Image (cartoon, rainbow, N blue to C red):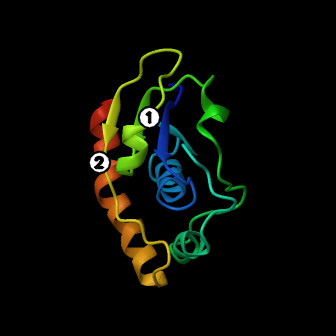
Amino acid sequence: MNTPQTVLVLCTGNSCRSQMAEVLLNHDLAGRVRALSAGTRPQPKVADGAIAALKQAGLPTGGLYPKDVEAVMNESIDLVVTVCDNARETCPMFPRPAPHIHLPFHDPHGEPLESFVAVRDDIRARLIPAVREALGL
């Protein structure tokens, strides 16, 4: 069995889009991808709407918490994905070069659960295939 490739999903707050992307990648590409997420300016907690949208889809939410990008700088990253424009602009340099893709998603903070669900579904529809393509899966 091949070792899973590591994907780092970056966002500003690491409280919504990047967290949902981490869970979706780990679920939908299990065994092929190990997804991590981090933020350039992490928030104190994962957004309640993100947790609810993931639970509604039957996805695991245990252990999710916002992390600073410094927490993952020593990881061997095979692909960096930025999911918001601010994170793209402030994307850090990693110890070794890693391919990078940018797929921005709407920020549903402060909106009803339906917005979080729509973003979750958009991440699944666009990000999963983009990661598959970028990693040759």
Residue at point 72% right, 55% down?
Answer: 63
Residue type marked 2: Pro
Secondary element type, mark 1: loop
* Mark sitting earlier along the chain (1/2): 1
Percent from the top left, x then y, of residue 81? 40, 40
Q: CA distance from mark 1 to mark 2?
A: 22 Å
Quarter of the image where one finds residue 88: top left
Does 105 sit left or right of 63 as displayed? left
Residue 17's place in the image compared with 118, above or below, is: above
Viewer-closest of 111 and 137: 111
Secondary element type, mark 2: helix
Please tell me the numbered disc located at residue 91.
1
Number of other residues with Cα within 10 Å of mark 1, as a class: few under 14, some 14 to 19, many 20 or more: some
Q: Mark 1 and 2 residues: CB-CB less than 8 Å, in contact?
A: no
Percent from the top left, x then y, of residue 116? 45, 74
Residue 18's place in the image compared with 9, above or below, is: below
Please tell me the numbered disc located at residue 56.
none
